[in-house]
Amino acid sequence: AAGVIQSPRHLIKEKRETATLKCYPIPRHDTVYWYQQGPGQDPQFLISFYEKMQSDKGSIPDRFSAQQFSDYHSELNMSSLELGDSALYFCASSLVGAEEAFFGQGTRLTVV
Amino acid sequence: AQKVTQAQTEISVVEKEDVTLDCVYETRDTTYYLFWYKQPPSGELVFLIRRNSFDEQNEISGRYSWNFQKSTSSFNFTITASQVVDSAVYFCALSDVKAAGNKLTFGGGTRVLVKP
């Protein structure tokens, strides 16, 4: 069965650069979530989208923005990268109201 | 606000020993879901189990079992006869049920190290 696809899997950027992470949800899933997991930390909710509209917002820095496109894929844009942005970024998708969201394998971002 | 607490940061056992991971949660919602995820060294989040707030029936699946007690807001997880492959970080999570999606609040995780 198709799973949530995240690209790239690994990304190395320098401070002050910009990064774009992509998430392709499971077919027919209309809701996408983004989580950030710092080293040794638990995943923290950043933002979610339902039917291309932002549905919920967590502790997402102002330097980050995200959107969901008409094909339901989502992109997380991160500007003015800082060393502290180095983390594993997870995307998850679900059908609205479903009990469970399915996680992608994550994108590991390293800021040097 | 929702909160999940995993008091044990790290547990080390010898293979074939049983391991119990504690999880305590806080929520004002009457309807919610509880989850356990496994995160091996490779980094992906592996779904293990989901429970809704109305189902307090304990469950056993192979070497895994779960004890959900609403009265004490606990959702504990036991690995029986642990194996080296069980070494991972285990996260308990609580779902915020809303009309447009269910975001998760994770506990801090418990690192399980199973030694041969």
Image (cartoon, rainbow, N blue to C red):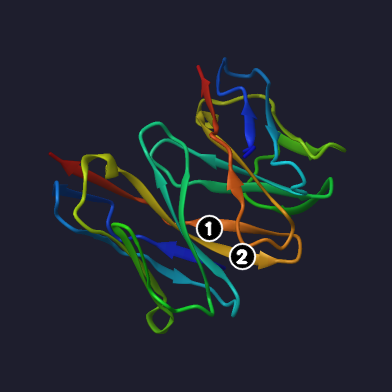
Question: Spatial distance from mark 1 to mark 2, Cα to Cα?
Answer: 8 Å
Q: Is residue A37 visible?
A: yes
Q: Residue at x 84, y 49 (%)?
A: A51
Contact between marks 1 and 2 (CB within 8 A): the answer is: yes
Q: Residue at x 32, y 58 (%)?
A: B62
The residue that disc 2 covers is B96
Q: Find residue A35 and name its label.
A: none
User: Element at badge 2?
Assistant: strand
- Chain containing mark 1: B
Viewer-side residue, A93 vs A22? A93
| Residue type, mark 1 in image | Thr
Viewer-side residue, B26 vs B36? B36
Toward which corner of the image does residue B4 lie, by quadrant? bottom left
Q: Where is residue B105 drawn, in percent x and y?
A: 53, 58
Q: Is residue B16 left or right of residue A103?
A: left
Toward which corner of the image does residue B75 lie, by quadrant? bottom left
Q: Residue at x 70, y 66 (%)?
A: B98
The residue that disc 1 covers is B105
Q: Is residue A22 left or right of residue B35?
A: right
The residue furthest bottom is: B71
Q: Is residue B108 visible?
A: no
Q: Where is residue B83 drawn, in percent x and y?
A: 21, 45
| Residue type, mark 2 in image | Asp
Viewer-side residue, A59 vs B59? B59
Q: Where is residue B13 drawn, in percent x and y?
A: 15, 49
Q: Where is residue A65 drawn, in percent x and y?
A: 74, 36
